Image (tube, helix red, strand yellow):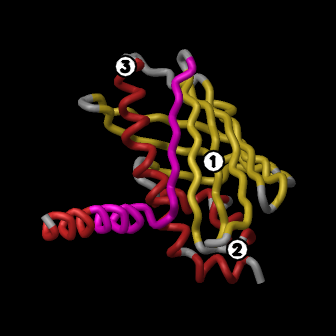
Amino acid sequence: MKHFAILFFIFISSCCFGQNNLNPYNLQVNVLRLGDRFQIQVSYVVPLDECQAFAFITDYEGSKNIPGIIDSKVISREGNRVRVERLIEERIMFFPISMKSTVEYTETSNQELNFEQISGDTKFYKGAWHLSQDKGGTLFQYESQVEPNLLIPKFIIEYFIRNSIRKRFEKMAERASQKKSSQTLACQ
């Protein structure tokens, strides 16, 4: 019985410590279906200061390294408003999907970035990024609402969003963490 208790304790400890290694950025993802729209909320912490974090999320053309984003280019910049054209390619089960959009970003401060699709293949896409200091660096908070314009059944789209969104933001957090040295130059 004593050996069983020790093995049980080791198993529980390894599970708990293993989970921290699987989520080094304290990534939190919440997807809620609201009729035909999906509300997405994501947060993670990366060891960057706020200036470096803001430089990372406003590197609009650098997002081509995120899974699914094939092309991303700035088409205009006026004051604090930036228009970005994107091409996204995905596969939802057996259905290949290609979507184009033009999104307008409004840089309101070094802590907030609002965005809204002004044209594109989704019916609705709008949201914001919020940045704040955290003990581990900067807390990135993303929130959006999206209404796809697809003939694919909603339950399949919901399944895809729930299962792919985590991978995308994990890749973003990882990429932000790796970009620290190059972002330092932008903040000097």
On residue 142, which mark appears? Answer: 1
- Element type at mark 2: loop
- Tell me which corner region of the image, top left, top right, bottom left or bottom right, holds residue 171: bottom left
Q: Which residues fall within the magenta stretch?
A: 12-34
Q: Is residue 24 magenta?
A: yes
Q: Earlier in the sequence, mark 2 or mark 3?
A: 2
Q: CA distance from mark 1 to mark 2?
A: 17 Å
Q: Nearer the viewer, residue 25 or 123?
A: 25
Q: CA distance from mark 3 to mark 1?
A: 26 Å
Q: Are marks 3 and 1 in contact (CB under 8 Å)?
A: no
Query: Mark 3 sits on what residue?
Result: 152
Query: Mark 2 sits on what residue?
Result: 49
- Residue 44: x, y in percent? 56, 58
Question: In the picture shown, does residue 185 fall above or below 118?
Answer: below
Q: Mark 1: few, some, or many residues within 10 Å (few <14, many ≥20)?
A: many
- Element type at mark 3: loop
Question: In the picture shown, does residue 49 fall above or below 132?
Answer: below
Q: Mark 3: few, some, or many residues within 10 Å (few <14, many ≥20)?
A: few
Q: CA distance from mark 2 to mark 3?
A: 41 Å
Tell me the mark number nearer the camera, choosing from 3 and 1: 1
- Name the residue located 61 percent from the left edge and 31 percent from the top edge: 145
